[in-house]
Amino acid sequence: MIRFGPSGIPLSCKGRTLRDGIEDIHNLGLTAMEVQLVRVNLNERYAGDEDLGRTPREIPGELVVQIGRKEDRKEVLISSLDAKIEKGDVLYSLASGIASDYRELEELGDLAREMDIELSLHTPYYMDLADADGLAEKSVRSVIWGGMLAAAMGSPIVVTHLGMFGELEPQIGRKEDRKEVLISSLDAKIEKGDVLYSLASGIASDYRELEELGDLAREMDIELSLHTPYYMDLADADGLAEKSVRSVIWGGMLAAAMGSPIVVTHLGMFGELEPKEAMNRIAKNLRLIRDAYKKGKIRSRLGIEASGRTEVVGSLDELLTLVKNAKGVLPVLNFAHVHARGFGLFKRPEDFDEVLTKVEKASDGGHIHAHFSGVEHADGNELRYTPIKKGDLRFEPLAECLLDEDYDLTIVSSSPLLEHDAMYMKVILERVLAKRLMRPTKPEKEEKEERGAKRR
């Protein structure tokens, strides 16, 4: 199965809501969409009497990604769609603009599935998972929250950047043992005294809206994914690892509401950290996020995206190492970034096949989530994205590879032209297929059979 779709709402879409984007993608004949979690600003309020006993998933008009609860005089933060809200809890809601609530996300996820559109979610673009800028905690939270949104939409993956090498918050706040315990769960019950932290993301007004958007996407056979904020610091190179972890957890909550299969995140920069230390820190935080997803019943998978610059964690080898050390996390193949890091790596169908085979083996279940665009690069570093028609990264060899092999792939357009280039890739694939159908049938080559046997 090969899917094509844009990164975000199509530029040609007259409306700017997620529902508008899903419907427009369906009308364009595309079957994938990456939901952009650009902002992770939070609104917070104390839980009211009407909130008690409910879960974040059940709160109308808000995307509660974290419950703050006092435990032993500390605030415990709970990021779970199913945590029960208790008296005294503080609710942290995401002001993201993706959807009004989790119900809308779930409806959008259902709509996408009905329209055969695969939704993925991308975390905010600045990530610092290496904690190079002290933002690893913030980056992790963004990815977790992205996972919550993706879970609501039924998105199979949350995609994130990793962050720079550098120099090396939506949830329920609840007091436990005089400390605030943060709970990020859609199903956590809100209790009296809790502080609610809400995302001001603009994605949706609440989880109900996210669920509706997920339903809409499924109805239109559109796959929704969610991307966490682009700055991540999962290595804690900038002291922002905790913030990054929360962002990823919150992204998971949004993705869960929409039923998005994946939450995508960057990792962050190395900063002044030794590469080994940065990798160990990131792996630890990825396991933390993965476990938070499991605890919060977030079915969306966490995906880590390849980076395009050497100071940012996320070379192909680094991704493959991290997914080995954090079981259950998926590699997200950004062709433009890998091409740039490889000094113009992709030239022939065989070049694409070699990389796809590695990523497929590292992706349990075999499905590959990928990004494609043109790219301008120099000295092993990405300079900027370009339209696909520009630059030396051509889609035709990839199309040849995809027709030669049986890959299960979702390709998100990250080109400046977004949906135009998503459709352009689809057209190129159809043209290459049409040319093949017009040729006289040739016997299968032994090399192709051997290559297929190796993949299997």
Image (cartoon, rainbow, N blue to C red):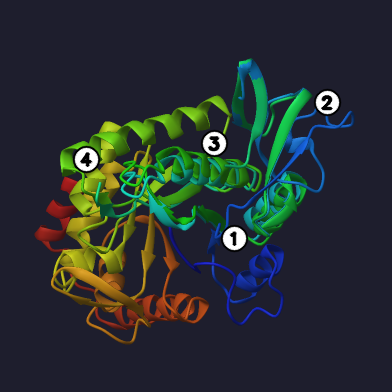
Whether 228 is drawn above or below 365: the answer is below
Q: Which amino acid does the dot numbered 2 rest on?
A: Leu
**Lateral position of residue 424 relative to residue 193, left or right:** left
Give the residue drawn at x 46%, y 75%: 422
Place residue 307 in its image quadrant: bottom left
Which residue is labeled 3 in the image?
299
Q: Is residue 311 left or right of residue 65?
A: left
Residue 118 drawn at (x, y percent):
54, 56
Residue with the mark numbered 4 = 321
Q: Which residue is mark 1?
A: 222
Q: Residue at x 64, y 75 (%)?
A: 27
Q: Is residue 153 left or right of residue 368?
A: right
Q: Position of residue 163 (x, y in %)?
A: 34, 53
Mark 3 vs mark 1, CA separation in Å: 18 Å
Q: Position of residue 428 (x, y in %)?
A: 38, 80
Q: Is residue 45 visible?
A: yes
Mark 1: amino acid? Ile
Amino acid on which disc 3 is placed = Arg
The correct choice, above or below, for 432 with respect to 371 in the image is below
- Outermost residue on the right side: it is 50
Label 3 to label 4: alpha-carbon separation: 23 Å
| Separation of residues labelled 4 and 2 (CA atoms) | 44 Å
Numbered disc 4: secondary structure:
helix
Of the image marks 1 and 2, the number of the one nearer the N terminus: 2
Residue to which mark 2 is pinned: 52
